Image: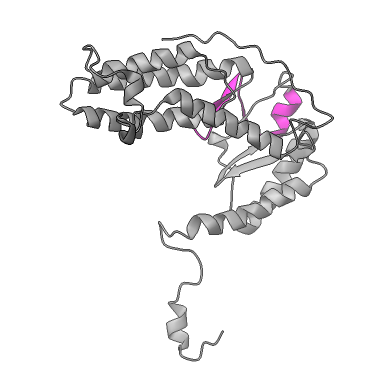
Amino acid sequence: LTTRPYTTEQLYYFRLTGCRQGCPLSPFLFNLAIEQLAEAIRANEEIAGINIGKTKNKISLYADDIILYLTSPERSIPAVLDLITKFGTISGYKINLTKSNALLINSSVSNRLKAISPFTWAQNSFKYLGVNVALKLKDLYLINYIPLLKKIKEELEHWKMLPISLLGRINVIKMNVLPRFSYLFQSLPCYLDKTFFKSINKMLTSFIWKNSLPRIAFKTLTKSREKGGLGLPDLQMYYWAAQTKGLISWDYHNVLYSKEMHLAQLEPTKTPII
């Protein structure tokens, strides 16, 4: 790198650090920087994570949102805080304690744990990337799907009487309803039975036809335009696709067929319907 074409005065005004707001390189540069912290946490023997099959898990990251999976918290938490402090000294990265929560899974929070950790200790759940993570698996439906169903029902009731065409109403479902359900389908291991989707389809039908009798069968609407439909999303098919994706991922990591793992027999639970 040569600087001959530039004078000292010109170089003084040349920005050597940082990037403009909205720069497409910004998230990639941040990922490169934060990965050093992630690698340090993974390599630290004092920090105990959880084992899933043959894979050790300690940390997951999505940009600056970090979630840690720790065992032996009285030993692991101080080690994590020490690494984060050292990383922050070099990078300027600091924890936002007002947005940081900890959830103890199999025992109560002791006074010693409260003393060594600056986090807010959640009682039953905490939110990560828009998903409520519950202490008990059976509560995932109640704290995620029920609020979403109520919110979407209220919105559709508000939009129902607006002068929107049939295609416009289907596009509303595609752009507003589908992405929110699809995100939960991919994020949560919840069993959703046929009655759940029947209730959603009933709600969508009421919105599409403004409480009047349907002039086209719901199943026909879900077909592609080439097959005589209008491309209305079939949420149950999206749910099945999301669950299948998870099974493929588990198989890829040799978890389903690991000698140390045994498939538990899943018993469907009754899901409350609005």
Residues in magenta, as a range: 111-132
Between 6 and 113, the one nearer to me in the picture: 6
| Residue 249 placement: quadrant | top right
Between 34 and 248, the one nearer to me in the picture: 248
- The structure residue drawn at horizontal position 50% and vertical position 72%, both measured from the top left corner, is 16
Which residue sits furthest bottom?
A: 4
| 20 relative to 110 in the view: left or right | left
Between 56 and 267, the one nearer to me in the picture: 267
| Residue 101 placement: quadrant | top right
Which residue sits furthest left?
A: 163
Residue 97 visible in the current orientation: yes
| 33 relative to 184 in the view: left or right | right
Which residue sits furthest front?
A: 227
Please identify the quadrant where the N terminus is shown. Answer: bottom right
Q: Position of residue 117 (x, y in %)?
A: 69, 33
Q: Is residue 244 above or below residue 27?
A: above
- The structure residue drawn at horizontal position 47% and vertical position 26%, both measured from the top left corner, is 237
Q: Position of residue 33 (x, y in %)?
A: 61, 57
